[in-house]
Amino acid sequence: MRAAILFISTLFIAAFIATLAAFGQAPKRDLTGIWAPVNAIDGIAPNGARNMPADGKPEHELPYTAAGLAALKKNRSSNGPNEVAAADENDPAHVCDPQGFPREVLFELRATHFIQTPLQTMMLFTYNKVWRNIWTDGRGLPKDPDPHWFGYSVGKWTDDKTFVVQTNGTDARTWVDNAGRPHSEDLKMEEVYHRLDQNTMELTMTLDDPTYYTKPWVALNKMKLKLLPPTTEIPEMMCSPSEIAEYNRKHASRGAKQ
Amino acid sequence: MRAAILFISTLFIAAFIATLAAFGQAPKRDLTGIWAPVNAIDGIAPNGARNMPADGKPEHELPYTAAGLAALKKNRSSNGPNEVAAADENDPAHVCDPQGFPREVLFELRATHFIQTPLQTMMLFTYNKVWRNIWTDGRGLPKDPDPHWFGYSVGKWTDDKTFVVQTNGTDARTWVDNAGRPHSEDLKMEEVYHRLDQNTMELTMTLDDPTYYTKPWVALNKMKLKLLPPTTEIPEMMCSPSEIAEYNRKHASRGAKQ
Amino acid sequence: MKKGFGIWVFSTWMMTFSLVIPGELLAHHGSAIYDNGKAVVVKGVVTEWTWSNPHCLLEFDVKDAKGNSVHWVAEVSNPPDMTARGWTRKMFKPGDEVDLTLVAAKNGEPIGRIVRVVVNGKTYAGMGAVPGEAKQ
Amino acid sequence: MKKGFGIWVFSTWMMTFSLVIPGELLAHHGSAIYDNGKAVVVKGVVTEWTWSNPHCLLEFDVKDAKGNSVHWVAEVSNPPDMTARGWTRKMFKPGDEVDLTLVAAKNGEPIGRIVRVVVNGKTYAGMGAVPGEAKQ
């Protein structure tokens, strides 16, 4: 008898979940699952932040301060309109320094596993197999954080579909994106994850760094992400200095010869 | 009225959990939480796998095959009885190649966050902020895996307290441990996580690599781990080639001068 | 291109627009070193296939009319991206004959980026579009 | 040790056993370069403090009797390990006077590993035990 009740209950629950999914209803306050940009190139973003690529168009010119412009000029990227040959660039990620944050999201954002615990939301990235912790226990940002590659992040649900993350304390050695946009230790960021339905969400990301930029700017504007099957195998894609040395020896260094 | 029932139910559930915790009862089939070796040095293991350190004692001599011994001799470690100066060693982790598996567990095993989803158990490590996926959906190991830094892992509960993980498909470029023990692509591993009570578990890890070792050997033998508070801040500890270059320039290279 | 390699070159200059299509530019590194307007077509014999980050590398020897051998090294993207295009770690082995369409380095070094390859009767798409061909 | 540095050396050789206590050997790199049996005690003025992996580095100048300055670079472990011992990213600033107990390189280079440091009236434990002292 108890087994029968259990069986029937399970059937009902399964039917309920199936119905929700069929109507595309999103679960409330839940981002659990493996997500990837709908357009792969949006996440890979070789030319810099998707909403502000370094494509030379005036509307994509960032609002640099004098200090920001000076910092930009030190970064020699092998992508974008001012790209240099691979052997001449100084991209810290190309020597396998950690990409850090926000670059982990603004470059090489591939399949990303979101997991929620009672106290935090975890993001497990494809690139470098790195994880990121977002506290959701109500705490605020630290006032005078030590800089870290991935900064310090706190998040909260502003409604049942909208998860807002604040980050500070990032390391100024990292690039903002693959085009070599710089940031200072004063950078603060806001990410808004807005779930549209069962299989879709949008990510908007705003950077505010008064030392290097005269005003906040939107790096991602409602970039669409799709939910992948829970059995998705996230491929291994890790930076290896010895592999890069081999690539440079066999290939990149020879392309740069005059 | 409904609110009152909800409130009283919540109280009962809280009291039940508190009672369980007070009696040290472990939750069933659950490793969720942040765990660290009871003795920090067991996890850091500078001299190699805790149960078989490279300390020159005959009982810690590993059962190398001829091929295994040849591979061992190529690895020059800056730890252990045959240690060389930092500038003379060839430890792949010291150029920031991924430590990979099993070294991520046999060296620098610090606070590690275990998270379970319906299909997998995730381990989020301190060192290099790297995550590892263990499928728990009943699948077996791949027959002819491409090698990956972290291999391919599947796990299952053999009883309510015992989680057993099998791994193959690791990359032979990685070292087994900090003493430079080698492994081939034929390496298979078994980890047994046995939960003793709410706050304690033991890890036993056996390596079986018939190409490099004449018989399986136990790298960790019931190494004790303790549960840390869920608000534990896992410190950021990431390998950075540019930081290592600076360290070598200012320090290590000068210590090696004759 | 250096003269005398004897490789079969179909040289079609595209003057009006760049052929680096954003949706195909998945590489970490840019294309500044390449002459992206010119397709280089060669037959080679594989010597090594490196399935590795940051970019996989195919090495092969190309014989010229006099029987001299030139050693080429050509890249595609990283293993996850190439897996998505049907490439595998074991698709080439030393001794395999390959028909390659490349873009090559501006400076004449025998290095390039594979746009298309035929091996063991199968055709694989590499990186970017073939200069001179309409995009499919 | 090179002569003439004028540093205050308390040279106590420990012949019977190694002082590298396993529980304290938290570093990535070993101690092969150090003369672990001899405590080197110096007063210095901080020039730089690098709170970084793989090992934090303290740089400081030490004056000898003639007023010549020797620039030292001394390591401890990584930031997480040192945080656990109460060290911080901002505990030293250029100009701080420090009393240091070190083990130094066998080859006489002015590099070392900090066993104990006193700065601004506070004493901090570094790496390992002080040669010649009983373990506490």
Image (cartoon, coloured by chain):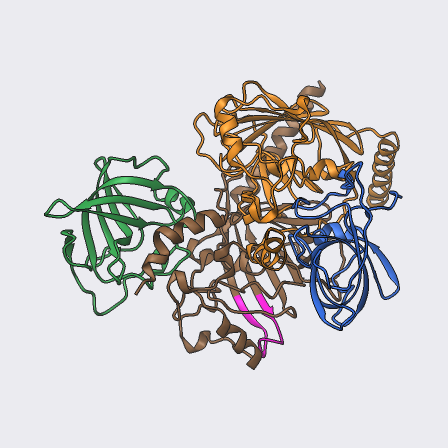
Chain colours: A brown, B orange, C green, D blue
- Frontmost residue, A133 versus D125: D125
Q: Quadrant of residue D119?
A: bottom right
Numbered range of the magenta stretch: A206-219
Reply above or below: C106 against B75.
below
Residue C35's spot in the image, x, y percent? 26, 62
Report the quarter where the N terminus of chain A lies. Answer: top right
In screen coordinates, is C88 left or right of B72? left
Is there any visible trace of residue A198 in the rendered image? no
Reply above or below: D15 against A86.
above
Furthest-left residue in view? Answer: C65
Query: Residue C71 in magenta?
Result: no
Residue B30's spot in the image, x, y percent? 71, 32
Residue D109's spot in the image, x, y percent? 66, 57
In screen coordinates, is B53 left or right of B10? left
In screen coordinates, is A255 left or right of A65? left
Q: Residue at x 45, y 60 (%)?
A: A45
Q: Count the labels in the image.
A: 0
Report the quarter where the C terminus of chain A lies. Answer: bottom left
Q: Quadrant of residue D51?
A: bottom right
Furthest-bottom residue in view? Answer: A66
Is there any visible trace of residue B249 in the rendered image? yes
Residue C115's spot in the image, x, y percent? 27, 51
Q: Quadrant of residue C92?
A: top left
Q: Residue at x 67, y 30 (%)?
A: B53
Q: Residue at x 52, y 42 (%)?
A: A22
Reply above or below: B56 against C122.
above
Furthest-front residue in view? Answer: D3
Query: Residue A209 in magenta?
Result: yes
